[in-house]
Image (tube, grey):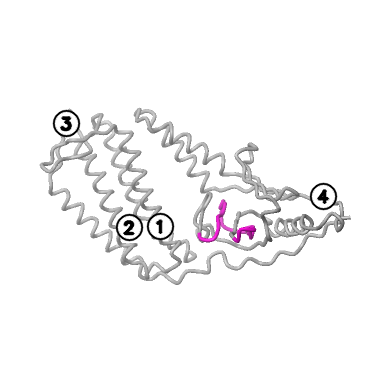
């Protein structure tokens, strides 16, 4: 396993495990839970806040996976080993343990309750939650120890040769690229929304919409022609991204790891942005603004060569074009 992938696994592991535990507890107790659930408790342990089961699961999913993703992205973008970021890794593990225990404890407290208003949560549960957080934090501290130095990221892209074109000759290049990760996220989010729809939480519509959009954008067509670079969903002309030739200084190609570019999907990173579908061959554009744009796609070398030729032709004067 590459160092980048190992770091991502270590960083994402606690939030995913905590979410899986909460999901399993919810599924096991679903028929024994009141509607709404008691989800907030006063200093005396009495319930003073209530949420529907579907909304509770949506919030737990967003908090656990969202916080884990933010911590992971922050650590990966820092460009340092996990050993050098041990405190942040330990905090991330501790936070996942604390939140996961609290969400699961709320579900157990509500099990078999006739009415949510009668549910109580004793104060000693906070002590147990803190103990779990401490144990998880220690685990994170240990796992961050043997991490090796990070790689050079996407590296220095190889210079792309020009693609010879005769005067007046027209050429275009196009490839379709898919992302299993984005497809899995889209399908998973859509299915989660469909499951929550049975609970009538009100949030399932947005989950379904987001899931369908992610699924549609999981496969796109990348095209290079006289208009520049265009990226659009394979099944529809819109939405699309287009970078005209006038905005491109030069194009190169090289190997890139999805995580080194910031993760999957549209990523904004220091000095530029990227459309990341998977690891592998990537097209790098140096823009007139000094920023860089990258898109992962097969046969990026040919795309870069054609772009450089078209850019050179576009910058010639009318008399030079013949």
The residue tagged with tag 2: helix, strand or loop?
helix
Q: CA distance from mark 4 to mark 1?
A: 45 Å
Residue 108 in the figure: left or right of residue 319: left
Q: Earlier in the sequence, mark 2 or mark 4?
A: 2
| Residue under the point 41% across and 61% down | 75
Which residue matches tag 2?
92
| Residue under the point 43% across and 57% down | 73
The quadrant in which residue 60 appears is top left
Q: Position of residue 247 (x, y in %)?
A: 67, 54
Residue mark closest to the camera, 3 vs 4 = 4
The quadrant in which residue 115 appears is top left
Tell me whether circle 2 and circle 3 mark residues in contact (CB < 8 Å): no
Q: CA distance from mark 3 to mark 4?
A: 73 Å
Which residue matches tag 4?
170
User: Which label was assigned to residue 126?
Assistant: none
Q: Earlier in the sequence, mark 2 or mark 3?
A: 2
Tell me whether circle 3 and circle 4 mark residues in contact (CB < 8 Å): no
Which residue matches tag 1?
72
Residue numbers of the magenta segment: 270-290
Q: In the figure, 209 relative to 280: above or below?
A: above
Q: In the figure, 214 relative to 79: above or below?
A: above
Q: Earlier in the sequence, mark 1 or mark 3?
A: 1
What's the magenta bit mostly, secondary-structure-wise?
Answer: strand
The residue tagged with tag 4: helix, strand or loop?
loop
Q: Earlier in the sequence, mark 2 or mark 1?
A: 1
Tell me whether circle 2 and circle 1 mark residues in contact (CB < 8 Å): yes
Which residue matches tag 3?
117
Q: CA distance from mark 2 to mark 3?
A: 33 Å
């Amino acid at each position: 396993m590459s160092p980048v992938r190992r770091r991502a696994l270590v960083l994402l592991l606690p939030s995913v495990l905590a979410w899986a535990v909460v999901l399993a507890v919810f599924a096991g107790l679903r028929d024994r839970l009141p509607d709404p659930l008691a989800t907030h408790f006063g200093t005396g342990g009495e319930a003073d806040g209530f949420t529907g089961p579907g909304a509770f699961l949506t919030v737990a999913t967003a908090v656990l996976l969202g916080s884990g993703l933010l911590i992971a992205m922050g650590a990966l973008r820092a460009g340092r080993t996990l050993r050098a970021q041990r405190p942040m890794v330990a905090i991330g593990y501790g936070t996942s343990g604390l939140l996961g225990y609290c969400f699961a404890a709320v579900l157990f407290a509500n099990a078999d309750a006739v009415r949510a208003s009668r549910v109580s949560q004793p104060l000693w549960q906070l002590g147990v939650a803190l103990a779990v957080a401490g144990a998880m934090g220690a685990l994170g501290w240990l796992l961050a120890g043997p991490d090796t130095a990070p790689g050079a990221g996407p590296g220095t892209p190889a210079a792309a040769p020009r693609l010879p074109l005769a005067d007046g000759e027209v050429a275009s290049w196009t490839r379709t690229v898919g992302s299993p990760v984005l497809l899995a996220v889209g399908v998973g989010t859509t299915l989660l929304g469909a499951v929550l729809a049975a609970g009538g939480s009100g949030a399932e519509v947005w989950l379904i919409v987001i899931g369908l959009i992610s699924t549609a954008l999981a496969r796109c067509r990348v095209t290079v022609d006289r208009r520049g670079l265009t990226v659009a969903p394979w099944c529809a002309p819109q939405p699309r991204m287009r970078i005209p030739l006038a905005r491109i200084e030069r194009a190169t190609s090289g190997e890139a790891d999805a995580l080194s570019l910031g993760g999957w999907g549209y990523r904004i990173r220091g000095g530029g942005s990227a459309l990341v579908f998977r690891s592998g061959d990537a097209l790098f554009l140096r823009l007139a603004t000094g920023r860089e744009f990258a898109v992962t796609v097969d046969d990026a070398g040919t795309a870069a060569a054609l772009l450089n030729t078209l850019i050179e032709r576009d910058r010639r004067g009318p008399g030079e074009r013949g």
